[in-house]
Image (tube, grey):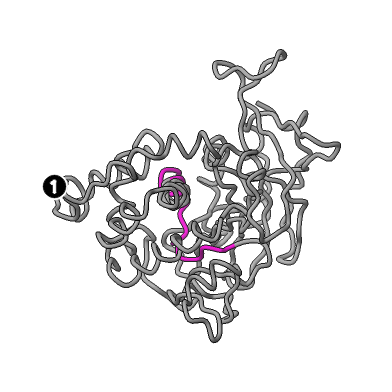
Amino acid sequence: MCREECYSVVPELQSYSHKPEVKYIDTRFMTLGGYDPGNHTVFVGHHADKTEEYLKSAVDATDGFIPMGVEIEVEHTSETDHGMSRGESTEEALIELHDYSPHYIDESDSRLRQLIIAKTDSSLSHGVEFVTQPMTVRAHKLMNWEALQSKGFYAWNASTAGMHVHLPKSYFTTTQLWLFLKLYQNLWTSEKDYFNWLAGRAENSWAKRQMPFRNSADNNLLAVASTKWDDRRDRYSALNFLNAYTIELRFFRSNMNIDGLLSRLEFVQASYDFVCVLSRLNKKDMFDAINFGLSKQLHLFMIGNKSEYPIISERLLNTNKFGVTSDFVNEDMVIPSLINGLNQVRKGA
């Protein structure tokens, strides 16, 4: 564990326009002799390819785990309520976040200063936006998220705060992105209660659940998937395609609770894995999944692979409305090749 040897943390609040160097961050198990799953964990940085085109080499570099650039918006209490200013709380949080993280090794000559920065945001009343490098879910799980606690920050009860996740467009083939859009279309039209529970909130003006489209396209979603662009050009869309190289998911309620935060990242990884597996199925199984409802198929996929998504699957299994005692899904909906396809996709990442 380190900070001084691996990072030179700048603990101050940065301006909203600040753009740090970007790398895809994943984890590796290493010894002096090479990789060893039973030994030390380190962070490894990979060059972030700025392209909209699908790059199998990028997916291979992180073993099929998609890098997520996460923005966690929080508000800060009045200084008289907590005894620390917003700046002091931010400084302590950033230092502690890096104090307990694994070592960082870079594959090039450049080295990241830090893995998480803090920015001001005019949409917040007296808040901070903590922004991560695009890290895989397993890298995010190694950060000391406890550092955000007991410093006057609050998130879940802040009406202004959301949690946004940026995904690289280069990790999606056209088919995978088409299925990703079909999934969210199903979630937003047929399973609103289920999606509200997953997101932690209903639709709002900062995360409008409107499907992207291309002007004059015969097949809207396929046109968006093939071009990775949305002619709506609305940065407040819940699926925001306005950024050149990323898709921004804007629908989550902000959450500083560690399990709450990580369960959302597991959900994003599961959604990505789900469409990757789905894209490799024979046409009958793929269209059976679509006809059964992709929301319910994703639900079965997460529960069927609960060792991969332990936090979100535990929540799903135990919720009254959608859990094991509900009738949200049933055995007749199970498509074995979909439930069991994750290992094969990871091998072929």
Furthest residue toward right: 109
Furthest residue toward top: 33
Image spot of residue 62 (x, y percent):
61, 39
Query: Which residue was labeled with disc 1?
Result: 325
The amino acid on which the numbered mark 1 sits, given as a three-letter code, is: Thr
Image spot of residue 48 (x, y percent):
72, 49
Furthest residue toward bottom: 216
- Which residue is pictured at 77% across the width and 34% down the height? 107
Q: Is residue 261 left or right of residue 240?
A: left
- Which residue is pictured at 61% across the width and 54% down the height? 130
Choose between 55 and 241: the one closer to the eye: 55
Count of number-bearing discs: 1
Choose between 346 and 241: the one closer to the eye: 346
Image-quadrant location for residue 76:
bottom right
Q: Compared with residue 210, is residue 187 higher up or lower down, i.e. above or below?
A: above
Choose between 326 and 176: the one closer to the eye: 176
- Which residue is pictured at 57% across the width and 67% down the height? 226
- Which residue is pictured at 51% across the width and 61% down the height? 177
Q: Compared with residue 24, is residue 75 higher up or lower down, i.e. above or below?
A: below
Magenta span of residues: 247-262
Q: Is residue 42 magenta?
A: no
Image-quadrant location for residue 198:
bottom left
Q: Is residue 242 left or right of residue 252?
A: right
Image-quadrant location for residue 131:
bottom right
Image spot of residue 158 (x, y percent):
46, 65
Q: Compared with residue 184, is residue 205 higher up or lower down, i.e. above or below?
A: below
- Tag 1: Cα neighbours inside 10 Å, few (<14), some, or many (≥20)? few
